[in-house]
Amino acid sequence: MLSNYSPPIIRSSNDLSKRVYIEFYYNSKRIRLYNGNCIGLKLHPNRAKTSQLRDKIVKRLRNEIEVRLNDGRYHPGVSNKRNERRASTPFTSALKAKDDIYLITTYKVTLRDIHNKFLNFLTKEERLLNVEDLPVDRIQEFLFNQQPGTGSMISLQLGSREESVGDKDC
């Protein structure tokens, strides 16, 4: 295989106030990586409190980049976020976002229940799929099999609006 990249080099300083990064050329373009986000790793050398720890993290980052370059698994500009979008991830994120806002407790409990039922409904392989690759018919199958009681979630979320509208029988 033709090498279309230069070896990754660590650019650093002993001064902790200056940022360290990995520099290399890929397809004649200079690439500077300050952390492991683009390769899906939580490596952040510039957050280190000591220069020894920073050097250790940046060396690991360089090694991980080098391995991916050699294997042909490094592709700049292509985010690895898609790999993090397994079926369970966006649903769990949405659930956490709902937990952070003010909603009626029974509504939150119902959401958690449906969330857990949905993840249990999916096969292990389906849970590992990207959300975009999840078969629509499987989602529809889950929704069609839900009990009618979960449809009252809207009234739980809004509170009992019927009482405030004034449509009561006198």
Image: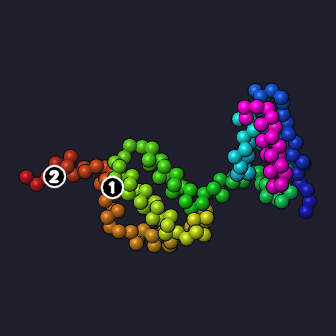
Give the amino acid at mark 2.
Answer: Asp
Circle 2 residue: 167
Q: Could you say which disc has been placed on residue 131 in the image?
A: none
Residue 14 appears anywhere in the view: yes
Residue drawn at x 83%, y 43% is 59
Residue 37 appears anywhere in the view: no
Relative height, residue 21 to residue 76 (above, below): above
Give the amino acid at mark 1.
Answer: Ile
**Which element type, helix, strand or loop, lies under badge 1?**
helix
- Comparing 73 with 122, the one in front is 122
Distance Cα–Cα, label 1 vs label 2: 18 Å
The magenta span reads 48-68
Q: Could you say which disc has been placed on residue 154 in the image?
A: 1
x, y percent for residue 28? 87, 48
Q: Main secondary structure of the magenta part?
A: helix
x, y percent for residue 22? 82, 41
Residue at the right extreme of this rendering:
2
Q: Is residue 56 magenta?
A: yes
Residue drawn at x 75%, y 27% is 17
